Image: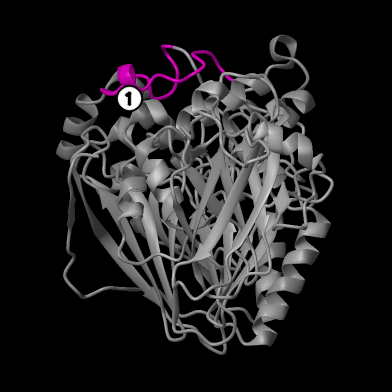
Amino acid sequence: MECEAGVRQMQFDRRKALVLMGLGAAGQATDARAWGHVSFRHGVASGDPLQDRVILWTRVTTRGSDALAYTWRLDPTDGKGGGKHGEGVTGPDRDFTIKVDAVNLDPGRAYSFQFEAGGTKSPIGRTQTLSEGPIKDAVLAVCTCALYPNGYFNGYGAIAKLPRVDAVLHLGDYIYEYGGSGSYGMDSPVASERAHDPSHECLTLGDYRRRHAQYKTDPQLQAAHARVPWIVVWDDHETANDSWKGGAENHQPATEGDWNVRKAMAIKAYYEWMPIREPVGGGFAINRSFDFGDVASLFVLETRLTARDHQLYAENALPKDPTLAEVAAFKQRLADPARKMLSVGQEAWLGRGLAASVKAGATWQVIGNEVMMARLFTPPIRRYMTAEAYAKAKGELSRAGANRLAKIEANAARGLPWDTDMWDGYPADRQRLYRLIAKARANAIVLSGDSQAFWANELYDAEVGGKRVAVEFGAAGISSPGPGEAIAQIPLGDAFAKYNREVLFNDQTAKGFVLLTLTHSEAKAEFMAVSSIHDRAFTTKPIATYHASPGALGVSPLKTASAPLQSQSHAKA
């Protein structure tokens, strides 16, 4: 990584750098062919904006394996001066990726940026710093779960074409580790043209690098990255499915080696390929905060690799036909206060940040979090359908769908949570987080990913009664198949909303993102759904909109929008 001109972290000999850049005594660039056709196949990106700095990113594609020098420049779009520029060297040790922390910038200012290497210029990107002091509003696009083989990244394309967006918040599953003909998403009608590279499951540093490289060749993802800065956090699939600090569901040490080695290689590739400000000294501490003027403070939590204890799954912990006592004992194990999602240090960091934000006068305290936080009990679907409708829908299910429905009905009868990889698997830690919100008197909004579904939830500090502590908006996947798709004939989302006190809205099949607009008087969440992920021509429209207001006693109940919903058409990308 390198800072602005004159403040470089990577030390190199200037004369050697001039040779590497193809600059002789007269300063003329050599023909690009001398560099093995240098190109920028993976676009440009920016991220982690603050009031005075922003990360700039790209990757150089070259046939050579020697170190390669580059230059960069950042120019205000208003043309009033204050541009920055610099130079550096990249190479195979970081997969020829480039990351610059451009500093000493002006708050609330828009910039364009570009790189050059071997006489070739990169595409031009746009970025902006965060505003300081009083502002009118802030607009975030919130997304998650993009599975390359399962569909086109139309949601990213829609984000790139938004009339207004200040930053993209990506809550994880930016890539998936799976591979092979029978793997997740490979039954998609477009999978043959979007098969994963490498074709096997990612295990090594080279595997994860290739997978990141493949995703970043997608033109719609490139367009969204080039549009605005991104704020990112990993979830599980950047390493392996259902990861925790000591392993993962999709990691078998006997055949796939040491988890810590795999985890370190996956995160090294992530740091190389993502526009994120890396923690000093490395590691997994990517908890960060961002102040959008006096409207909102955003806190991004890492809940996978720092402190998370091993998940307790009912299918593993309970016999096939458990007794009531065995189910009660399982629930008691889930509620063990010792079970952790966050470390003590993370909790202290969040508590201080929430309190400081409220004291500074920010209207909203927003928590970016990888998995759903609401209490989500498995709904008894049969209760919300007529016998005739239920029998008809069940008869139309595939074998996989029928098996999923049977599991849902069994877990509903036992009063079990929907998914214990979510906060429902760590209820005591969730209560600790709720106490931090209450102590700070925050107007809290939780933004969540992972579930491949849209959610509008109100979060309470007790299962019955209690106080509302926050509202939660869950983002559907960009292209990943959700659990509701295997039983699309069943109104699963409707059943969730009817059965669960905290759920006001749930859509289990839509794809898209949440468009969150924050002002001093309200938060508006629009669930932006794309019409298809299997057709490059698509439309985008909000399928539901929810509003909340800040208050002295905390956030208000959610209200639905009364305005008509408008769709936006998109030509083939």
Residue at the bottom extreme? 552
Q: Nearer the viewer, residue 513 or 74?
A: 74
Q: Is any part of residue 425 visible from this angle?
A: yes
- Residue shown at the point (47%, 85%) measured from the top left: 520
- Residue 90 figure quarter: top right
* Other-residue count near label 1 (Cα within 10 Å), few / some / many at <14 / 14–19 / ≥20: some
Magenta residue span: 181-202
Residue 321 position (above or below residue 4):
above
Q: Is any part of residue 501 visible from this angle?
A: no
Residue 283 position (above or below residue 168):
above
Q: How is the image coloured?
A: one colour
- Residue shown at the point (81%, 40%) measured from the top left: 12
Q: Which amino acid does label 1 sit on?
A: Ala
- Residue 267 figure quarter: top right
Q: Position of residue 292 (x, y in %)?
A: 55, 74
- The residue at which mark 1 appears reads as 402
Q: Which of 494 and 479 is in front in this view?
A: 479
- Residue shown at the point (19%, 44%) measured from the top left: 538
Q: Main secondary structure of the magenta part?
A: loop
> In the image, is residue 191 part of the stretch drawn in magenta?
yes
SS assignment at label 1: helix
> In the image, is residue 47 part of the stretch drawn in magenta?
no
As drawn, is 163 to the left or to the right of 539?
Answer: right
Residue at the front extreme? 26
